[in-house]
């Protein structure tokens, strides 16, 4: 099937209408919408190729039933599979380690799941600090103005913030919440500005000689938590496009570095969709997206609404990788090694995940189907399905 | 257990205990199967594998036949012949226990019939029949035992029974009535569930008083909150768990969130001109510089930083329908040939072939000629806008090759049989959702017209 899709993609790109048409026809017959996971995967690619052939650039996901989640629906949905939970669990664990002994913590959340990680983070803080005074947590959330799946029905961050604060209070944690509208297209500049401004103001206030609170002089621990959000940053390098001085990704890391964070956590899908060549992208997408299709049987029954939503979200991604070019193609995942390189160039150093983090992840995976696993790669931790890399998590400190 | 006795009846007493221990390990420890064979071998014959063990490969059917040895009197089945023989004794039937001599200590190992399985390899064989049977069920069998409470499914009845006993004991229940088996899901749900909000409203009726206890610290925080967020990003809100929420979240910003995209847009546009509403008296110099820094902060990203397109409402969906319609009309007026070059075959999952003709002629409004040549890609979609986009898109794509295109009979199929051919492709692509994109025929001049004619 992969070969057929490749041929079809080549034909479409060469505007060889006849072979394209033939192969589309064949694919359509061998990949029924109610087929097995591989057939449904193929069908998703078929759709994407047809869309590409039709060149409807303004219509990403327009013919997909992309579900817009309510808050509670999304909370339930992200926990169905380790896809996001893995990153949450690994991140929570290292963040707890990093803030140990600090009394004021500023967590910046750049995540696609709209704060779905935060309750578990607050809960782990509360659990860890039982009998001790937990740190005061300021949470700055990047509220994406453009988003990919999972999509929110209506992101009312005020409401979300009130709920989180309430929840934190019920756990005995003092939480401040702030949502900053942001976008990857300028490298989350508004969030970085926000952090920088806050740092400068804190320094001013605490550095004020008339201020009597000497014990407050401790600087906030700054944690940057990036869950599946950085691949939306543009990856184009100067050698590909001379008008670019430095890729947005590298710039982002440099900007982060200048904020001297206590820790940066990056969780991304471990796959390469950055190729400019359609066939290259198609191959890596086909050899990656079988995983979500393969796993769905283990947690969602046939015909369930959630399963439709879940598969439509994968289709959205496939469509984005295959049908679109330029700025519209936002699913530009990079493999772990390339991210590591960028981070190293920005003078970050990966810190190993503690045994505790590994244990937490393992315990989390126990709650899911047997095909899931985790392993260490260098300092990072990788989620696997049947031995194939799915998502990686890395924790960085300034070197 | 006689079952263990007969399997190793000729072994010594100590070996017997070893064997029964092994049986119980392998039947309960299903999750650690890959580790099992070495452990077992070690226990029976330390330090070396068992080269004499008889490797038994049963077909799935034989393996799954639960009780192969059936008593002809009462139809009771047994897994082992020896057990049946012992049973026959109860019926006063002739019975015979095989007496194995000590020289024939034949150990048996069982492989999994599934070829792709690690236990298919004799070197990874399992030591007892029950073990391999349960393994086969669990790993390759249908999970027909379902827990009614949590929907978890099991292939082996005993696993299911064991689960039933503990299911619900590690369950989490929200006040709203929803049950969770995973703590993380429960925690997350709990945080966002209204039940918590109601509860905390009861428990903390005077959160204001609590805040006052901490007044010195609050002073700083409120200073920070007035100077920081409002001046920097007007669309943001600052709320604190210690402060009463309503008072710290300005009404204006709440309102602005009702339509985030639009208000963000406006605010972004106005941001550079609008100075922070009020600066803290104690810090006149610093906030100003901060404010400047904010306005230019994005410059670290160079030109890209200036493009704050994201704040604008996404223009495409609204534009595409009207703009493309205009474009299409323009094309139709300027040179009908372009549109004529598109054989539009469209269909929705509900629309029959005759509808498709009407649809086509409606969409190609500016074009009066019913004869459509060249190729067409039908893209029925929401509100028909996709079709227009397609009309443009496909012409640019396959346009140059139009004259030489082969028809391939695909269009014929579409017109000829409702179940095959193009319309089926289009319909099936729709997949019951909104109708998806579909490839349509690369029709020659006369064919496209004919097709539509035939199908109507």
Image (spheres, rainbow, N blue to C red):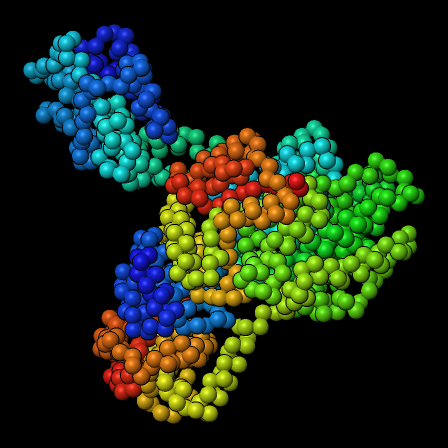
Q: Quadrant of residue B108?
A: top left
| Residue A381, visible in the rendered structure | yes
Q: Residue A394: x, y in percent?
A: 56, 42
Q: Residue at x 42, y 79 (%)?
A: B396
Determine the residue located farthest toward the right in the rendered image.
A210
Q: How many marks?
A: 0
Determine the residue located farthest toward the top in the rendered image.
B13
Q: Quadrant of residue A263?
A: top right
Residue B279 shown left or right of residue A75 in the figure: right
Q: Residue at x 70, y 28 (%)?
A: A131
Say which quadrant the N terminus of chain A sits in: bottom left
Q: Residue at x 89, y 56 (%)?
A: B285
| Vertical comparison of A46 with B106: above or below | below
| Vertical comparison of B405 with B77: above or below | below
| Residue A152, visible in the rendered structure | no
Q: Residue A52: x, y in percent?
A: 41, 68
Q: Quadrant of residue A284?
A: bottom left
Q: Residue B407: x, y in percent?
A: 26, 78
| Vertical comparison of B449 with A336: above or below | below
Residue B322 shown left or right of residue A218 in the figure: left
Between A374 and A124, the one lying in front of the other is A374
Q: Residue at x 23, y 76 (%)?
A: B409
Determine the residue located farthest toward the left in the rendered image.
B94
Say which quadrant the C terminus of chain A sits in: top right
Q: Residue B309: x, y in percent?
A: 63, 68
């Amino acid at each position: 099937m992969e070969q057929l899709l490749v041929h079809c993609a080549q034909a479409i790109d060469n505007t060889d209408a006849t072979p394209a048409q033939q192969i589309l026809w064949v694919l359509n017959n061998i990949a029924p919408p109610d087929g097995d996971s591989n057939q449904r995967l193929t069908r998703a690619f078929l759709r994407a190729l047809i869309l590409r052939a039709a060149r409807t650039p303004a219509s990403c996901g327009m013919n997909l039933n992309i579900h817009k989640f309510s808050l509670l629906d999304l909370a339930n949905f992200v926990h169905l599979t380790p896809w996001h939970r893995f990153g949450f669990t690994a991140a929570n664990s290292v963040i707890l380690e990093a803030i140990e002994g600090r009394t004021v913590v500023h967590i910046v959340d750049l995540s696609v799941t709209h704060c779905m990680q935060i309750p578990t983070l607050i809960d782990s803080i509360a659990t860890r600090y039982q009998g001790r005074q937990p740190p005061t947590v300021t949470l700055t959330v990047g509220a994406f103005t453009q988003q990919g799946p999972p999509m929110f029905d209506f992101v009312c961050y005020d409401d979300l913030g009130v709920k989180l604060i309430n929840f934190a209070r019920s756990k005995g944690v003092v939480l401040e919440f702030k949502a900053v509208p942001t976008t990857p297209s300028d490298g989350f500049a508004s969030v970085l500005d926000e952090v920088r401004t806050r740092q400068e103001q804190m320094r001013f206030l605490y550095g004020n000689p008339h201020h009597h609170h000497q014990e407050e002089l401790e600087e906030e621990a700054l944690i940057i938590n990036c869950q599946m959000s950085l691949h939306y940053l543009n990856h184009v390098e100067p050698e590909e496009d001379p008008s670019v001085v430095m890729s947005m990704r590298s710039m982002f890391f440099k900007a982060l570095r200048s904020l001297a964070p206590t820790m940066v956590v990056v969780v991304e899908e471990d796959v390469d969709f950055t190729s400019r060549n359609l066939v290259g992208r198609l191959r890596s997408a086909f050899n990656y997206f079988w995983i979500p299709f393969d796993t769905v049987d283990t947690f969602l029954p046939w015909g369930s609404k959630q399963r439709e939503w879940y598969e439509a979200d994968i289709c959205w991604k496939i469509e984005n990788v295959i049908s679109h070019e330029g700025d519209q193609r936002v699913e530009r995942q990079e493999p772990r090694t390339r991210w590591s390189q960028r981070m190293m160039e920005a003078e970050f150093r990966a810190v190993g995940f503690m045994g505790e983090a590994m244990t937490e992840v393992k315990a989390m995976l126990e709650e899911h189907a047997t095909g899931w696993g985790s392993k260490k790669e260098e300092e990072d931790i990788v989620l696997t399905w049947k031995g194939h890399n799915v998502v990686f998590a890395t924790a960085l400190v300034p070197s | 257990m006689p079952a263990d006795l007969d399997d190793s009846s000729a072994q010594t007493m100590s070996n017997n205990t070893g064997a029964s221990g092994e049986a119980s390990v392998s039947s309960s420890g299903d999750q650690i199967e890959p580790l099992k064979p070495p452990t077992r071998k070690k226990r029976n014959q330390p330090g070396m594998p068992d080269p004499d063990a008889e490797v038994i490969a049963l077909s799935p059917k034989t393996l799954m036949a639960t009780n192969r040895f059936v008593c002809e009197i009462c139809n009771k089945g047994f897994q082992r012949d020896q057990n049946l023989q012992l049973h026959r004794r109860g019926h006063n039937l002739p019975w015979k226990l095989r007496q194995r001599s000590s020289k024939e200590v034949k150990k048996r190992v069982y492989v999994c019939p599934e070829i792709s399985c690690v236990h298919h390899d004799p070197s990874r064989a399992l030591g007892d029949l029950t073990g391999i049977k349960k393994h086969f069920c669990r790993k390759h069998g249908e999970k027909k035992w379902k827990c009614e409470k949590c929907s978890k499914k099991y292939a082996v009845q005993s696993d299911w029974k064991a689960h039933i006993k503990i299911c619900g004991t590690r369950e989490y229940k929200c006040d709203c009535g929803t049950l969770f088996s995973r703590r993380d899901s429960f925690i997350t749900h709990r945080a966002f569930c209204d039940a918590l909000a109601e509860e905390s409203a009861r428990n903390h009726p005077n959160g204001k008083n609590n805040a006052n206890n901490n007044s010195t610290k609050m002073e700083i925080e409120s200073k920070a909150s007035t100077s920081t967020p409002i001046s920097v990003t007007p669309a943001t809100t600052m709320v604190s768990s210690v402060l009463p929420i309503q008072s710290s979240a300005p009404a204006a910003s709440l309102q602005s969130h009702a339509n985030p995209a639009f208000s963000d847009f406006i605010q972004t546009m106005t941001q550079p001109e609008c100075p922070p509403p009020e600066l803290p008296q104690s810090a006149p110099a610093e906030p100003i510089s901060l404010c400047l820094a904010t306005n230019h902060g994005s410059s670290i990203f160079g030109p890209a930083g200036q493009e704050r397109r994201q704040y604008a409402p996404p223009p495409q969906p609204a534009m595409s329908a009207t703009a493309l319609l205009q474009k299409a009309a323009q094309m139709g007026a300027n040179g009908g040939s372009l549109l004529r070059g598109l054989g539009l075959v469209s269909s929705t999952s509900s629309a029959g072939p005759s509808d498709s003709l009407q649809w086509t002629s409606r969409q190609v409004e500016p074009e009066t000629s019913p004869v459509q040549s060249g190729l067409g890609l039908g893209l029925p979609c929401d509100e028909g806008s996709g079709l227009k986009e397609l009309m443009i898109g496909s012409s640019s794509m396959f346009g140059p090759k139009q004259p030489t295109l082969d028809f391939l009979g695909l269009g014929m199929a579409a017109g000829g049989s409702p179940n095959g051919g193009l319309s089926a492709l289009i319909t099936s692509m729709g997949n019951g959702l909104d109708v998806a994109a579909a490839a349509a025929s690369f029709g020659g001049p006369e064919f496209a017209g004919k097709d539509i004619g035939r199908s109507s």
